[in-house]
Amino acid sequence: MSIDETTATNGGRGVEGLAPPAPTDFAARVEYGKEARRRTPRSSHEGWTPPAGRADPVALLEEQATTRVPELVPIRHARMLVSPFTFYRGAALLMAADLAGTPVSGITTQICGDAHLSNFGVFGTPERRMVFDMNDFDETLPGPWEWDVKRLAASFEVAGRNNGFTDEERHEINLAAVRGYRERMLQAAGSRVLDAWYDQLDTERFLAFVEAERQRKQLGSKQVKNADAALAKARTKDSMRAVSKLTEVVDGQVRIMADPPLIVPIEQLDPVGRTREQEEDWMREVLASYQSTLQLENHPMREFSYVHLARKVVGVGSVGTRAWIVLLRGREDQDPLLLQAKQAEASVLERFLQPSAYDNHGERVVRGQRLMQAASDIFLGWHRQAGFDGVERDFYIRQLHDWKGAADVESLVPSGARVYARVCGETLARAHSRAGDRVAIASYLGHSDRFDRAIAEFARDYGDQNERDYAAFAAAVASGRLQAAATV
């Protein structure tokens, strides 16, 4: 199903009364964006006021908990309770419910659905280059591109408050994120077709951009050195390092170390009477089925064999969904591979947009990721498997670590946050330009900063909303309505 066939219910059927233009008719695509702007002015995105009858944020979180591992839900709440920013990270459903009532242009693309600043970072490509890109697609779905932009800008507002930035500093940072998005989209729209599709931000370009900002006195030398150090550190995060941290040798065999409740080996979760042989047979079936979804025919996965499995708590919003780490070996124990199998539920966007075109939500995540990322992990695939309780669930599978690194949000200073906001905005634009009509979106955005200012004001107001929701959440924990673990 195409993007245009799977569109938002809130104005997302396309620009009302107009059929989306043919991809080869560039002039019509420009006019389509201009007509969308006439019907939904850029100023209409300005600000945020909670509507009457807005859903109870605590009730939405309680609803999400019903499909999750019960003993892990208090860990999710504990991680969200750390700060308004960690709450924001776990509150994708709350914001999706709010965004569903906001104006949209009617132009759709594949969207991330959870485009906050911590879901961007560096990772290794199959060609062994390091790139900066989006790295979380649990909620991906075709929908209004504005929703991603608003969630990204608001995340910088919330993080800036958490770091003690002034109102003026936060405003400039929010503007930088949206300006980066708009200007990169305009560049993509004016580029040759393949140049727009191949565009990516590798570390060489990233460091050159950082150095240019230093020369413009937008960054200090210390921040440039910190960026170099962060990239060097990311290169050390591979399977060998992960194996050294997460495994031990037991009776001559490599095993994933227990660290309950965050890491629990499979033998501590198995139903009574399940043998090791049954466990290994089950995992071999999983891996064999998953391999059919990989993109390479002669895939290196064929040369790895199963060693061990453990449940692992990951992230903030994802805590409570089933997530596993799988230890494999190649030629020998010193040739390891760690995969992560993460449960994929229906996107939080689906109750507000058209349902996914894919029956398997793992496939939904993988196909959305492959469309939006400049380069994807060669081990990225999906699978559906019945758990020990007999319930079938969808999963997507990827490498646990492959040169992965992200910004330390709490250490960001205003100048660094402003540069990082622009980089994230540009990266989001690259993803949207590959997955949707970059020409129409750019035409809607235009060359003025009208849209930038409208979204910056939305981000400011939504920061207030997030603080109110966080206070309600904290009160629910204090009253005992929600349970939060003592450890995160």
Image: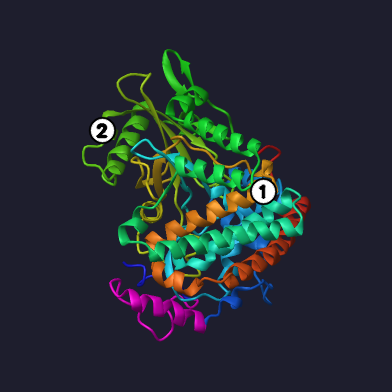
- Please provide percent x and percent y for residue 305: 31, 28
Q: Which residues are magenta?
A: 10-39
Q: Is residue 192 visible?
A: yes
- Please provide percent x and percent y for residue 134: 48, 50
- Please provide percent x and percent y for residue 226: 61, 35
- Protein image colouring: rainbow
**Residue at left offset 38%, top offset 59%:** 434
Q: Nearer the viewer, residue 208 or 163?
A: 208
In this picture, is 231 found above or below 479?
above
Question: Does 12 appear in magenta?
Answer: yes
Tell me the residue that label 1 is attached to.
Answer: 415
Q: Amino acid at mark 2?
A: Arg
**Residue at left offset 33%, top offset 73%:** 26
Q: Nearer the viewer, residue 54 or 483?
A: 54
Q: Label 1: how many residues lie within 10 Å, few (<14), some (14-19) or many (20+)?
A: some
Q: Is residue 22 left or right of residue 71?
A: left
**How many discs mark residues in the rendered view?**
2
Q: Amino acid at mark 1?
A: Ser
**Residue at left offset 59%, top offset 53%:** 421
Residue 72 is drawn in which quadrant? Answer: top right
Q: Which residue is situated farthest in the top direction here?
A: 252
* Disc number for residue 302: 2
Residue 253 is drawn in which quadrant? Answer: top left
Q: Which residue is situated farthest in the front direction here?
A: 215
Determine whether the residue tagged by mark 1 lies in a helix, strand or loop: helix
Q: CA distance from mark 1 to mark 2?
A: 47 Å
Q: Is residue 337 left or right of residue 234?
A: left
In this picture, is 340 found above or below 198?
above
Q: Nearer the viewer, residue 220 or 312?
A: 220
In this picture, is 398 found above or below 247?
below
Nearer to us of marks 1 and 2 is 1
Q: Which residue is situated farthest in the left direction here?
A: 298
